[in-house]
């Protein structure tokens, strides 16, 4: 999984040019996405339309470079198609599109997919299915009240087949969450809403596995995993920098970042950070 995660980070870096992408948040979510597809979810290139497959909903849709990078490694998507990022000839852009194999639902407007995940999980329960449903949220996304409504409904209907995974990288856009609308104590809040909660290091595959191996965490309760992560993980030059929220690097800077990812020291990058929202 470490090798696959490294490859995914390479794909993300290469997508951070010719228009750019949300590189920081994408890098923080890589290990979570890789683990879920490799070890937890019953989803593969041969069962993408199987009603018995598991479901992953990327509610923080701006992390789509991490999702598409994982799709390349899983064989869902041809590597060459990533070169079409932001072109008019493909459906690969800043947010997930269901024309891409493996994408279950469009996302981008934060706070929308928790309700979708609840609906799918409820349908599975009604049908007597065994499918697992995972919804990945951003921590800043939790400022949307619809997220908390979804938690309440999920517990009201005892949806223990649903897991909300929070990518807790401590940033909301270009400011720290605790400086804008503080979230902590986050675990206590989820537990007060009735969830069964695990908190893990979101870059430690062993710790992530240990949490998911106990699924469902508690019968008749929605599962929540708070994954403590680092925005920009893998690139010390941009890690935890508010001004490296959305980046559009030159081709030369991409080459430097790829070297940095593999442990080489690089000079300070000079490109202006582009704030899209």
Image (tube, rainbow, N blue to C red):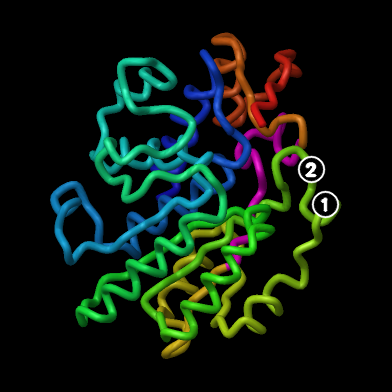
Relative height, residue 77 to residue 60 (above, below): above
> For this view, does 206 lie left or right of residue 47?
right
Of helix, strand and loop, which mostly describes the magenta segment? Answer: loop
User: Looking at the image, do the residues carrying marks 2 and 1 touch, with CB atoms under 8 Å apart?
Assistant: yes
Instruction: Name the spot of residue 133 as percent of width and height, x first.
Output: 36, 66
Residue 252: tell me if it is visible. Answer: yes
Residue 69 vs residue 174: left or right?
Answer: left
Seen from this angle, which residue lies furthest bottom? 219
Q: Which corner quadrant of the image does residue 183 belong to? A: bottom right
Of residues 259 and 93, the one nearer the viewer is: 93
Q: What is the x, y in percent for residue 189?
A: 69, 76
Looking at the rendering, the stretch of residues picked out in magenta corresponds to 226-241
Q: Which mark is residue 180?
A: 1
Circle 1 Cα neighbour tier, 10 Å, few/some/many (<14 / 14–19 / ≥20): few
Q: Is residue 3 visible?
A: no
Q: Please tell me which residue is depicted at 49% across the width and 83% down the height of the picture.
A: 155
Above or below, 131 against 2 in this view is: below
Q: In x, y percent, where is residue 26?
A: 54, 40
**How many numbered callouts?**
2
Find residue 175 and name its label.
2
């Amino acid at each position: 999984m470490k090798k696959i995660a490294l490859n995914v980070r390479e794909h993300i870096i290469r997508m951070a040019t010719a228009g750019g992408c949300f590189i920081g948040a994408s890098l923080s979510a890589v290990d979570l996405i890789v683990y879920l597809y490799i070890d937890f979810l019953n989803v593969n290139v041969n069962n993408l339309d199987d009603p018995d497959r598991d479901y992953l909903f990327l509610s923080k849709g701006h992390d789509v470079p991490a999702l598409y990078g994982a799709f390349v490694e899983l064989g869902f998507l041809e590597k060459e198609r990533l070169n079409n990022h932001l072109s008019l000839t493909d459906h690969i852009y800043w947010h997930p599109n269901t024309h891409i194999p493996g994408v279950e639902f469009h996302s981008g407007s934060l706070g929308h997919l928790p309700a979708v995940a609840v609906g799918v999980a409820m349908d599975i329960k009604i049908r007597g299915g065994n499918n697992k449903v995972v919804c990945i949220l951003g921590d800043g996304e939790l400022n949307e009240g619809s997220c908390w409504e979804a938690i309440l409904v999920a517990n009201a209907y005892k949806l223990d087949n649903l897991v909300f995974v929070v990518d807790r990288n401590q940033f909301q856009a270009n400011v720290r969450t605790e400086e804008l609308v503080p979230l902590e104590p986050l675990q206590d809040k989820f537990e007060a809403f009735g969830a069964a909660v695990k908190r893990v290091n979101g870059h430690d595959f062993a710790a992530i596995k240990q949490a998911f191996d106990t699924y469902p965490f508690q019968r008749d309760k929605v599962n929540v995993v708070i994954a403590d992560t680092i925005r920009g993980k893998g690139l010390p030059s941009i890690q935890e920098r508010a001004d490296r929220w959305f980046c559009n690097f030159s081709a030369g800077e991409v080459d430097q970042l790829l070297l940095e990812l593999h442990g080489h020291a690089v000079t300070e990058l000079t490109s202006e950070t582009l704030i899209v929202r």
